[in-house]
Image (cartoon, rainbow, N blue to C red):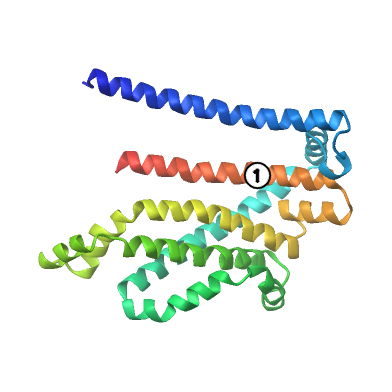
Amino acid sequence: MYSKEHIKYLKKIKIDKIIILSIQVFLIILFIGLWQILANYNLINTFVTSSPIRVLKTTINLYQTNNLFQHIFTTIYETVISFSLATLIGIIIATILWWNKFISRVLDPYLIILNSIPKVALGPIIIIWIGAKTSSIIVMALLISVIVTIINVLNGFNKTDSSKIRLMKSLGATKFQTFFKLVLPSSFNNIISALKINVSMSLIGVITGEFLVSKKGIGYLIMYGSQVFNLDLVITGIVILAIVSAIMYYIVYYIEIKLIKND
């Protein structure tokens, strides 16, 4: 049985969550409402900024022409593939770097340099090497997200309490046991944070790749809309992208909550 103080505390947390969610929803509604009002009274140039009604009409038109879900699923597919690969590769390489400090010291400046290079500049090279196809988009996304994943996960590994590591060694634990029994579990929050960042980084990489080579996807919609000066299509693509990004972020957040409960 919970004490009265604990029950009161849990109720306060629940109320705070409801208040925060209500404010978040209110801000979105307020933004959309103000946007539409400004458009109705010609206080903004709707050719440049579009309006919620025009975005809705463009979305309905994409749906009626069987283009909406085709573009959305293309971007989601490419993002999921690049996200999964970047996460797997990033954790494996971070583990290797933690395991071997010599290799970590050798590669550290290269990771920093690679992370600072604008990946868009590598786009033409990737297209020439791989070709103008889906695989080049996935490689572009990997270049953007995998280095960030390596750095974040490795930082989590290195922040493990050194006194606990020494205690494990004094008890005769092998490096393998130390990693899987101590380092990996203690870095759980850093890994989850890396996954959250990785979702957005993978999506950025996919959209960048679609700008360059794709004929399908949300990035293609935005690029095509800008080329034909259809700003309604551009804004619609951005809105759809924001929704997809939010959904993917909350999927990772939901997984985090489930893992914490099962821990």
Snapshot quadrant of residue 13 = top left
Residue with the mark numbered 1? 242
Residue 162's spot in the image, x, y percent? 22, 64
Of 226 and 181, nearer the camera is 226
- Most extreme residue toward the left is 171
Q: Is residue 217 visible?
A: no
SS at mark 1 in the image: helix
**Eyeballing the image, is 187 above or below 257?**
below
Residue at x 46% of width, y 43% of height = 253
- Residue 95, x across and y down, in percent: 36, 68
Q: Is residue 212 above or below residue 223?
A: below
Tag count = 1
Q: Quadrant of residue 25?
A: top right
Q: Residue at x 87, y 40 (%)?
A: 45
Residue in the foreground of this view, choosing between 102 and 138: 102
Instruction: Measuring from the top left, give residue 139's x and y in whole percent.
Output: 61, 68
Look at 22% across and 69% down and name the residue there.
175
